[in-house]
Image: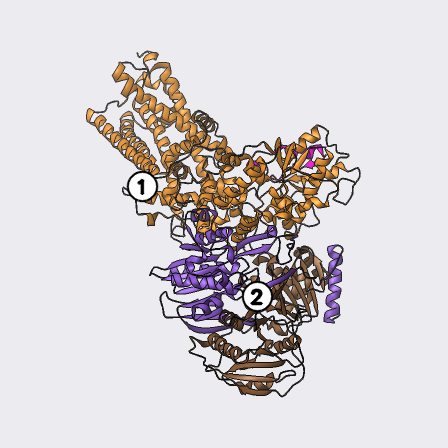
Chain colours: A orange, B brown, C purple
């Protein structure tokens, strides 16, 4: 009679030494293949450029662990896949830990210390947990198969918008096959594991130390009972066990060996990518060191090793593909396909023993693995891709760095070229003379302090659109009236202000950006103020996140937090509740970039508006399409536009009265889109500032002027 | 008594209109009634063109036989220089034209004469010295120039400013011989750049012209619709044609078409560069729409609207529904 | 093989400019300087000749102007010019096209290029004379308002297409070396990124004076010019009658003008 404490599973039971030897030999080969694969990958990464890793290791490690354990990023916006992957993840991790535990006991602790721990209650609970883990794993895998094979979400056919049928790398069936193979292999390993377990039980049914404890492996036990019911004898079970043991073992070893060569490597690359995550990747772009020969990314070896790792972390989940506003309107850009193209290119060129000559390493173009010019110029730099990626791939900085090369070559839309030249000449994108910048102040019944001459508490950075665009000038004047009414001590820089440069940088004209940032910082240094406020989210983003890299450290807020404070402190007191049914469009550079979701909503609440959220709101807000310099480029004739797409979403809200924006470019884009989509008359587009001004008036008045003389 | 020498311009056997405008300019530039107006005709076959040059005020037509049928800069430069040296006219008038760009400055470089181009006013100061007026800083200012100690003054005169004289005359026709040297350029042929099947803007009565202000190619369609709605033909300024948004045949201006038959011209988003004005400023009724109140177009237009092109286009189209 | 491109840094007027006290020019504070628009096209044409051929071609830009003209030259170096030369002397102030041409001709004699390009005219004073005057002083063949050029580096002749009034092109064959004045639209000038302009800052600009070119002070400046500015003034502009009111009101008025002018009852 075997004591409970001694109950265990004898490994290699009834194996000849030759058989055991063969197994270890195969394992050895598997490890060697795995090792070589890892070596090739690391050699590939080392062929990349140096990487600037921001943030302390401890913080990043903690964040990575948190993300992995919670699976928060995988579950976002795809609940089914998230839950299923959780099951797969935990199932696999437990099974892996289990196998490692056995190895530890059998191959390490046992021989070295003469001690075994894998027995008794530990062994029994262990068996139960692993059986459950196998169920989790299998359940997850089956759901994924169902999702892929029956639910068929469109993103999983991997159809790419940046190539046409007939192009060499248009066909994605290879990827689909690889994905199915991955699912089937894992599932097969799990199933054969259970059947193997059951076969062993049937084979050793005569041994009480095995049979009596069979319910600690419940799945195996069920299958064993069924097998016996079907007439499986012990000797037959022994044979079945023998063949399944080898099948399962070799399959599992092959799976492990192939990790670095297949999609399975995402186990490591995803974790690595998460470990290197820069939460400010899109908000604070990397600069170009003076010493660097070329401004942008031209060759695959210009990518940093972190970026090369990013490429390998991609599992083709398609969330970025779904989120991208350019892709949504049919532009030849999918962030996923930029990453996959470059990955294919990197694998083809950087995994070979010798590095190919430079001419073969150019990533720009239309050949397989290259990224086309139209693809790069389609990007709106809205960072929806970066924000949603579960494995922290940073698509945006890479796209901008590739654009830098296009700008150096002058490969850009002629209108964009003219705009950049105008900005260089006169510091604004409207081609107006510098002197015209403060022209909007002339219509006001009060003076606006000149921050170049007097010290002020609050410096208001107005921005190009707010200064020069006629529609936005009205909003600017209204905001000035609000500040005046609230008794805020504020001033502007008049002609000493230049375009803040956010979009110039995102177009890839880094030299011009440096010039603008330096000029603005010089203007800031020449004045005395406590903090900065702006109505322009783009200016807000760059001054807040990027100017410090150029020596300009300022406390800056977007007007929404300032005005919320003024309302809460009663320095601005609404005289009535507006009672309007509104929806709020989160501007990319305020919301997703800088997490400024709450202040505008709180303001709408204080104004007595009924806020109905659109489906794509807050972090998932859908870009108006003007970012990344696109507002300076013409859209293809007849094509859909992001702003129209967004308007249709808003129009689906029953009884909507006002579409509220808080960004000058949004105002311009959406007012146009309102007309173009035939929604004029159904609801209006208003800047939040305008609603605030309305609420401050005693009665309804059609005039936009707020302050009586 | 001094002589005013006018150099005629011709192309493909036809006299060009500025030649006769120059005679009008010569009239205006006379200091004394005894001043003679002499027209220089440098051509292979002068007899063809002499009749058209026989207008009121022309005292003499001096012909110089050119070895080639079409304009050649060195031939013209040498011919006119020879005439200047032989006859010492007080004033030489050329058109400010593409041909004269090719040789006018050459006269001044060697001859030690006074020289100014794109002149639209000729007068004399109290001391009898000639003062010519031209534009400056992109036509934003007017500049009076003088020619101290110069016996011969060569002026290239802006087209469309002076009027050709009415009536005919019977001038003396003489010939002038001089060594024209060897021409180092030769004419190969003329290429008409416009397509055969597009509109001839010169004959159109009502034109709606668009300029850089329309922003992008996608917006051109909007104005095409507007033009159709109000019954106008769509035209454009140079930047629009250069960008390929409309065919070259639709371009109005110095290097495009002159809207000779036009009665009503609506210019939208056109700033009014001098080259564009050259093609339309003569039109009886010009309406300019521009967001910039300082645009030059408003100085030649009869009516103006300062505003957003697209809003005005929209509102105008509504009027015709 | 060399192409010499003459460029000018032109001055545009700022808002609310003022005339100088002596009435002969605008107050310098109100001048905004930039490379002449025509010169972008002539430089681009020269750089394209270099890029199209296999034989080495050097593109040299020359500008007559004071130190602030270096900015325009840097821009040219960033756009592909190999070398830049600037000529200045106080005596050059007040020079007209003919005086400037004397300087350019001297530089051309020194450099001995195969082609000399200039813009048809400058966007500020639009003399449309400097290039051809230079040709006359050099005794070289010349063609003005070139909107199309076919040329092989080092060839004895080139084919040019002059853009005539009305848009017709006149094709001519011209012996080389020659002076050509280049018209807008002959090509699409490339973009010079700020970075390349900064990098071009490292390239030296050769500065020459009159002595090095063998020019006497009396040959330039006002003394060497063919005309002298007597007076500059802001002319009374004809002014359009502005249609006021809301957009709808303006449109209604305009519709009326259209109906009156076209005499149609629509």
Which of the labelled discs sits on residue C227, or is there none? 2
Can residue A626 be seen in this snapshot?
yes
Query: Seen from this angle, which residue lies furthest left?
Result: A18
- Few, some or many residues within 10 Å of mark 1 (<14, 14–19, 20+): some
Which stretch did the figure color magenta? A591-619
Callouts 2 and 1 in the same chain: no
Measuring 61% from the left and 70% from the top, which residue is drawn there?
Answer: B158
**Is A145 inside the magenta-drawn segment?**
no
Closer-to-camera residue (A560/C227): C227
Measuring 69% from the left and 31% from the top, which residue is drawn there?
Answer: A566
Would you say A243 lies left or right of C211 here?
left
Report x, y in % for residue B40.
55, 81
Residue named by callout 1: A351
Q: Quadrant of residue B289?
A: bottom right
Looking at the rendering, in which quadrant would you find the N terminus of chain B? bottom right
Which element is circle 2 on?
Answer: loop
Q: Quadrant of residue B96?
A: bottom right
**Is A606 inside the magenta-drawn segment?**
yes
Looking at the rendering, in which quadrant would you find the C terminus of chain B? bottom right
Closer-to-camera residue (A358/A153): A358
Instruction: Report in which chain the residue with disc 2 lies.
Output: C
Q: Quadrant of residue C138?
A: bottom left
Closer-to-camera residue (A154/B278): B278
């Amino acid at each position: 009679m075997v004591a409970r404490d001694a109950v265990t599973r004898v490994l290699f039971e009834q194996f000849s030494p030759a058989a055991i030897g063969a197994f270890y030999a195969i394992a050895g080969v598997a490890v060697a293949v795995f090792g070589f694969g890892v070596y090739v990958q690391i050699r590939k990464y080392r062929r990349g450029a140096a990487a600037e890793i921001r943030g302390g290791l401890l913080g990043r490690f903690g964040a990575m662990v948190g993300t992995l354990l919670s699976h928060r990023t995988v579950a976002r916006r795809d609940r089914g896949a998230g839950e299923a992957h959780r099951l797969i993840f935990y199932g696999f991790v437990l099974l892996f830990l289990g196998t490692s535990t056995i190895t530890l006991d059998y191959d390490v602790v046992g021989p070295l210390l003469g001690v075994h721990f894998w027995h008794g209650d530990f062994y029994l609970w262990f068996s139960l947990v692993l059986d459950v883990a196998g169920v989790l794993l299998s359940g997850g895998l089956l759901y994924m198969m169902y999702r892929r094979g029956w639910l068929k979400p469109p993103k999983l056919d991997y159809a790419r918008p940046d190539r046409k049928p007939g192009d060499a790398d248009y066909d994605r069936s290879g990827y689909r096959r690889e994905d199915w193979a991955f699912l089937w292999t894992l599932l097969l390993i799990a199933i054969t594991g259970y059947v193997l377990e059951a076969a062993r039980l049937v084979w050793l049914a005569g041994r009480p130390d095995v049979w009596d404890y069979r319910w600690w492996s419940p799945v195996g036990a069920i299958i064993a009972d069924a097998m016996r019911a079907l007439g499986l004898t012990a000797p037959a079970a022994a044979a079945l066990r023998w063949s399944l043991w080898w099948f399962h073992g070799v399959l599992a070893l092959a799976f492990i060996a192939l990790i670095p060569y297949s999609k399975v490597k995402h186990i490591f690359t995803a974790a690595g990518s998460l470990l290197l995550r820069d939460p400010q990747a899109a908000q604070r772009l990397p600069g170009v060191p003076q010493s660097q020969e070329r401004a942008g990314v031209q060759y695959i070896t210009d990518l940093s090793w972190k970026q090369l790792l990013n490429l390998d972390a991609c599992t083709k989940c398609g969330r970025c593909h779904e989120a991208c506003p350019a892709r949504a309107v049919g532009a030849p850009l999918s962030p996923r396909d930029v990453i996959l193209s470059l990955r294919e290119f990197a694998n083809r060129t950087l995994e070979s023993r010798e590095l190919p000559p430079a001419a073969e390493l150019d990533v720009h173009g239309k050949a397989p693995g290259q990224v086309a010019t139209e693809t790069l110029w389609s990007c709106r730099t809205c960072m929806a891709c970066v924000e949603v990626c579960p494995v922290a791939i940073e698509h945006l900085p890479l796209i901008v760095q590739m654009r830098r090369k296009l700008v150096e070559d002058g490969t850009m839309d002629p209108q964009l070229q003219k705009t950049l030249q105008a900005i260089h000449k006169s510091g604004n994108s409207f081609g107006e003379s510098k002197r015209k910048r403060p022209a909007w102040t002339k219509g006001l019944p009060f003076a606006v302090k000149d921050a170049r001459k007097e010290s002020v508490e609050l410096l208001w950075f107005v921005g190009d659109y707010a200064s020069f665009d006629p529609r936005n000038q009205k909003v600017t004047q209204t905001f000035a009236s609000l500040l005046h009414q609230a008794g805020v001590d504020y001033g502007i820089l008049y002609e000493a202000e230049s375009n803040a440069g956010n979009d110039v940088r995102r177009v890839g004209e880094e030299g011009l950006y440096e010039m603008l940032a330096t000029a603005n910082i010089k203007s800031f240094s020449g004045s005395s103020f406590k903090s900065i406020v702006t109505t322009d989210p783009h200016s807000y983003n760059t001054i807040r996140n990027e100017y410090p890299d150029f020596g300009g450290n300022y406390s800056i807020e977007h007007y929404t937090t300032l005005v919320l404070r003024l309302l809460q402190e009663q320095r601005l007191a609404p005289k009535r509740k507006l009672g309007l049914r509104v929806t709020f469009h989160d501007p990319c550079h305020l919301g997703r970039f800088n997490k400024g979701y709450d202040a505008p909503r709180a303001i709408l609440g204080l104004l007595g508006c009924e806020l109905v959220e659109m489906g794509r709101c807050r972090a998932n807000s859908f870009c108006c399409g003007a970012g990344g310099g696109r507002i300076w480029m013409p859209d293809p004739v007849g094509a859909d536009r992001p702003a129209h797409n967004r308007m249709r979403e808003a129009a689906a809200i029953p009884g909507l009265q006002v579409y509220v924006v808080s960004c000058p470019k949004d105002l311009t884009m959406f007012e146009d889109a309102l007309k173009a989509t035939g929604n004029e008359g159904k609801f209006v587009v208003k800047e939040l500032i305008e609603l605030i001004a309305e609420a401050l008036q005693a009665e309804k008045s059609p005039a936009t002027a707020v302050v009586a003389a | 008594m001094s002589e005013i020498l006018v150099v005629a311009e011709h192309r493909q056997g036809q006299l060009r209109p500025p030649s006769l405008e120059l005679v009008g300019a010569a009239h205006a530039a006379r200091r004394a009634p005894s001043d003679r107006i002499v027209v220089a005709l440098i051509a292979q076959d002068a007899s063809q063109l002499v009749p058209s040059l026989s207008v009121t005020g022309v005292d003499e037509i001096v012909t110089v036989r050119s070895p080639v049928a079409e304009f050649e800069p060195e031939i013209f430069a040498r011919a006119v220089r020879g005439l200047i040296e032989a006859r010492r006219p007080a004033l030489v008038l050329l058109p400010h034209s593409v041909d004269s760009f090719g040789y006018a400055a050459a006269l001044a470089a060697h001859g030690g004469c006074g020289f100014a181009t794109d002149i639209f006013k000729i007068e004399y100061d109290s001391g009898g010295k000639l003062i010519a007026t031209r534009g400056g800083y992109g036509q934003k200012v007017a500049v009076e120039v003088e020619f101290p100690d110069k016996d011969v003054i060569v002026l290239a005169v802006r087209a469309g400013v002076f009027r050709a004289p009415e009536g005919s005359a019977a001038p003396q026709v003489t010939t002038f011989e001089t060594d024209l040297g060897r021409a180092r350029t030769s004419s190969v042929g003329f290429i008409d750049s416009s397509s055969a099947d597009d509109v001839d803007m010169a004959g159109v009565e009502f034109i709606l012209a668009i300029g850089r202000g329309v922003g992008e190619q996608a917006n051109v369609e909007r104005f095409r619709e507007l033009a159709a709605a109000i019954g106008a033909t769509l035209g454009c300024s140079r930047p629009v044609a250069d960008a390929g948004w409309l065919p070259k045949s639709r371009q109005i201006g110095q290097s495009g078409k002159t809207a000779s038959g036009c009665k009503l011209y609506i210019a939208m988003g056109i700033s009014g560069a001098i080259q564009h004005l050259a093609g339309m400023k003569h039109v009886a009724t010009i309406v300019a729409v521009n967001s910039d109140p300082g645009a030059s177009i408003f100085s030649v237009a009869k009516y103006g609207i300062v505003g957003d092109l697209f809003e005005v286009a929209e509102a105008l189209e509504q009027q015709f529904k | 093989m060399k192409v010499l491109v003459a460029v000018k840094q032109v001055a545009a007027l700022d808002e609310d400019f003022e005339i100088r006290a002596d009435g002969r020019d605008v107050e310098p504070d109100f001048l905004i300087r930039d490379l002449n628009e025509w010169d972008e096209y002539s430089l681009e044409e020269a750089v394209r000749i270099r890029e199209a051929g296999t034989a080495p071609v050097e593109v040299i830009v020359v500008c007559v102007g004071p130190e602030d003209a270096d900015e325009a030259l840097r821009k040219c170096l960033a756009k592909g010019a190999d070398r830049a030369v600037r000529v200045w002397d106080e005596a050059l102030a007040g020079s007209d096209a003919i005086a400037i041409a004397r300087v350019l001709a001297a530089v051309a004699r020194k450099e001995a290029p195969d082609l000399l390009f200039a813009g048809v005219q400058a966007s500020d004073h639009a003399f449309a004379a400097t290039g051809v005057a230079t040709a006359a002083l050099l005794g070289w063949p010349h063609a003005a308002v070139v909107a199309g050029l076919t040329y092989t580096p080092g060839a004895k002749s080139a084919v040019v297409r002059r853009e005539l009034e009305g848009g017709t092109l006149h094709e001519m064959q011209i012996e080389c070396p020659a002076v050509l004045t280049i018209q807008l639209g002959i090509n699409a000038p490339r973009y010079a990124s700020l970075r390349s302009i900064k990098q071009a800052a490292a390239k030296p600009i050769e500065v020459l004076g009159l002595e090095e070119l063998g020019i006497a002070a009396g040959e330039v400046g006002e003394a060497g010019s063919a005309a002298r500015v007597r007076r500059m003034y802001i002319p009374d502009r004809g002014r359009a009658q502005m249609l006021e009111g809301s957009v709808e009101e303006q449109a209604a008025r305009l519709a009326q003008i259209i109906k009156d002018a076209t005499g149609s009852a629509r």
